[in-house]
Amino acid sequence: MLINKTPSESITIMTEMVMPNDTNPLHNLMGGNLLRWMDVAGGICSRRHSGCICVTASVDTVSFHSPIRMGEIVTITASVTRVFNTSLEVFIQVEAEGGDVKTRRKCNEAYYTFVGLDEWGNKLSLPQIIPQTTEENRQFDGALRRREMRLILAGKLKPEDATQLKLLFNKD
Ligand SMILES: CC(C)(COP(=O)(O)OP(=O)(O)OC[C@H]1O[C@@H](n2cnc3c(N)ncnc32)[C@H](O)[C@@H]1OP(=O)(O)O)[C@@H](O)C(=O)NCCC(=O)NCCS
């Protein structure tokens, strides 16, 4: 049975410390290692929400705003913004803290899309997410536009069929 949930019920928080083996020659966290941690947090979040194996279908653009140094603590927060049918979107935020553990700085954020599969690799319909707050509703509404954009880029949707994106550009 599919049990619908709220975004806050799906929140997954993962904490890591940057060790020497995670860094580049400047002793900052390597971007690829951060993407991996984000992928793991998103995978746990989507699995907890759906109760099935979830594989990464796509990762939207990620910018690295602020370097994260060796020894810093990294907090990765993931939550489901919207479920489509067999896929769902997860919003992932990254914060870092150094010597002053009371101050966290925002480092980056990204949207990952996961697809739910059974043990034989067949796609599964997933339980829905019911937004409650203004911010959760904003993310929920925006997810349709982001989905259209990524499916266009993946060659799975014709631009002329992107109804939500068209609405954005034809507001008059
Ligand atoms: C992701 C995967 C399961 C999609 O299977 P598919 O048969 O190509 O997909 P379909 O076109 O039938 O789409 C299935 C769902 O995935 C979504 N999807 C497919 N490609 C996508 C993309 N590039 N970005 C976002 N969503 C995508 C579709 O929108 C659809 O969602 P919906 O059911 O909620 O509407 C398949 O491509 C796969 O197994 N990829 C490898 C996954 C993996 O191993 N990831 C780890 C990295 S190596």
Image (cartoon, rainbow, N blue to C red):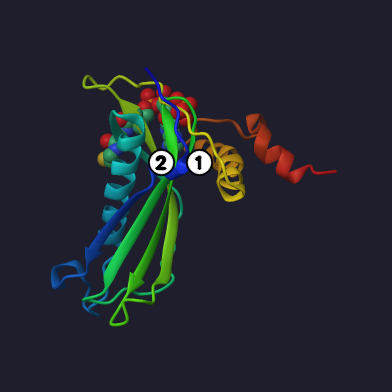
**In the rendered image, the vertical position of residue 153 relative to residue 66, given as above or below:** above
Which quadrant does the C terminus fall into?
Answer: top right
Disc 2/disc 1 C-alpha distance (Å): 26 Å
Residue 95's image quarter? Answer: bottom left
Mark 1 lies within 8 Å of ligand 1 (Cβ measured):
yes
Residue 121 appears in the rendering: yes
Residue 167's image quarter? Answer: top right
Q: Amino acid at mark 2?
A: Glu
Q: Residue at x 16, y 70 (%)?
A: 19
Instruction: Residue 25 in the image: state x and y as whole percent.
Output: 21, 77
- Name the residue at the bottom extreme: 99
Residue 90's image quarter? Answer: top left
**In the rendered image, the vertical position of residue 14 relative to residue 82, given as above or below:** below
Mark seen at residue 150:
1
Along the line of sight, the residue nearer the viewer: 84 or 169: 84
Q: Secondary structure at mark 1?
A: helix
Ligand 1 shows up in the quarter that is top left
- 134 relative position to 77: left or right: right
Mark seen at residue 9:
2
